[in-house]
Amino acid sequence: MAMRSQLYEWTATASIVDIQSSIFIGNTGNNITKPAETTATQFVVIEQVASSGSNPGGSATGTYTSTAGNAGLHMFAQVRINTTDYFLDPDNKPNDGIPGTASPYPRTLTLQPSFSLYPDIYVLPGQVWDVLVTQRGAANNAQAVQQCFVKYTLYDGPDALIANKLLELGISVSPANVDWYKRSLIQQQSAVVA
Amino acid sequence: MRSQIYEWTNTAQNGTGFTLFRRSTDTSVALASGTETSIFIGGVGYNITKPAETTATQFVVIEDVSCTPDANTQLLNGGNTQIRINTTNYFQNPDVTQQTGIPGTASPYPRGYQNILKTFDLYPDIYVLPGQVWDVLYTQGDRTLVTATPADVVAVFVKYTLYDGPDALIANKLLELGITVNPNNVDWYKRTLIEQQSASMGGMA
């Protein structure tokens, strides 16, 4: 139970056009009871963020067009840690985040990911995190669906301590590196005992 | 080390000029065939406030650049993307003359649209050293884009990793050693340092 793969899927039930809305506590779609946060003994690594994709160009309908049901969406997902937005433009101004066009959910044959979230995003013990979605296009299809998908790993207890140690050492926090650190400790202990 | 993205579209209010903030009512800005424009400060579509540059403690690795394809058979009206570091264009012809860079048909955005998949992979990556200015230049293909026309929206997508502080120092060190700068190698370098330190101290704390 020390390292657990976790996911969260969100589907809008009200308009998010030109509005940044939290997928956890944004009062639209499926929400949770309180903001997402880590306790003093937890460490979260966000590994994937995806949202509904749409296609620019090539069709005669919509401002940001597509031939599929999500025509015109132009959806984005931004990750926020405490009060800081993760994705910035090169002039250090927060942008709308990852375009659904670059990291689509769901993935289809005609809409594949251009972006993979690497390095991952860390949520340290005691921090509040959020995923904010927005739509910057005018959907021209009543069937358009605004969705967001987040995949993260929750490190708890001793593994959260190791995750902190790895962070302190400047090493990426991943299940493989947590295992490497444990193996190093065991090998050192064995060497001392022998 | 932070994964960063930038998406440019030729959309702005009333289909003219540029915008620093996206709105759902933005429409396509006209762009003549063959016109080259900076996706950051070109004055067309979504722009930022100043040229993209690295500070003395930053190191940028550009990992992917893609744009709307220019495929006449599929009614796609995109173009090509070129990367510029300071005043030097990255992609050149074999005779060292200028070219327009990566065709959207080879590195399409979005990937898979109209069944066009990726042919080109930006590897090795492109490094922007501390203190350098970088830019991505989009050149419109055969079709001229018309104002406020839904079918005339084109996009460019850039994925890069920003190394800051100690990670930028390690990135410079890796460059000096001739080793590829990527998160794995930065981690490897850190682990090597730690293991050397542990060995000299007789164990890891």
Image (tube, rainbow, N blue to C red):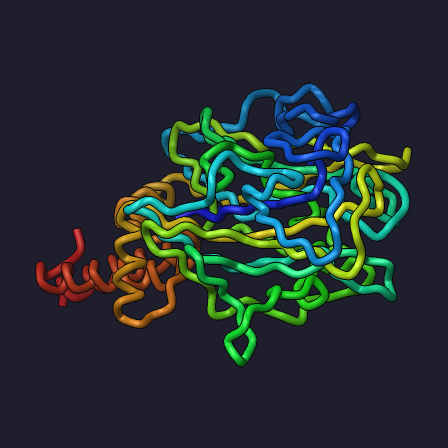
- Tell me residue A11's x, y (percent): 74, 33
Residue A162 seen in render: no
**Place of residue A155 in the rendered image (x, y in percent of width and height, measured from the top left):** 43, 43
* The quarter of the displayed image where residue A140 is located: top right
Relative to A166, does residue A25 appear above or below in the rendering? above
Is B78 drawn above or below residue A1 in the view shown? below
Query: Which residue in the rendered view is the most extreme toward the bottom?
Result: B94
Q: Nearer the viewer, residue B133 or A79?
A: B133
Figure quadrant of the C terminus of chain A: bottom left
Query: Does residue A109 appear to the left or right of B155 in the view shown?
Result: right
Which residue is painted at 58% across and 33% down in the image? A131
Identify which residue is drawn at 29% across, 46% down.
B57
Across and down, in percent, residue A147 comes to 73, 38
> How many numbered badges does the structure rendering display?
0
Q: Residue placed at 79% from the left, 52% from the top?
A: B144
The residue lying furthest to the left in this view is B201
Residue at the spot 33% in from the left edge and 59% down from the top edge: B186
Q: Is residue B10 above or below residue B72?
A: above
Q: Is residue B54 left or right of residue B38?
A: left
State the residue in front, A163 or B180: B180
| B200 in relation to A3, above or below | below
> Quick check: can you spot residue B71?
yes
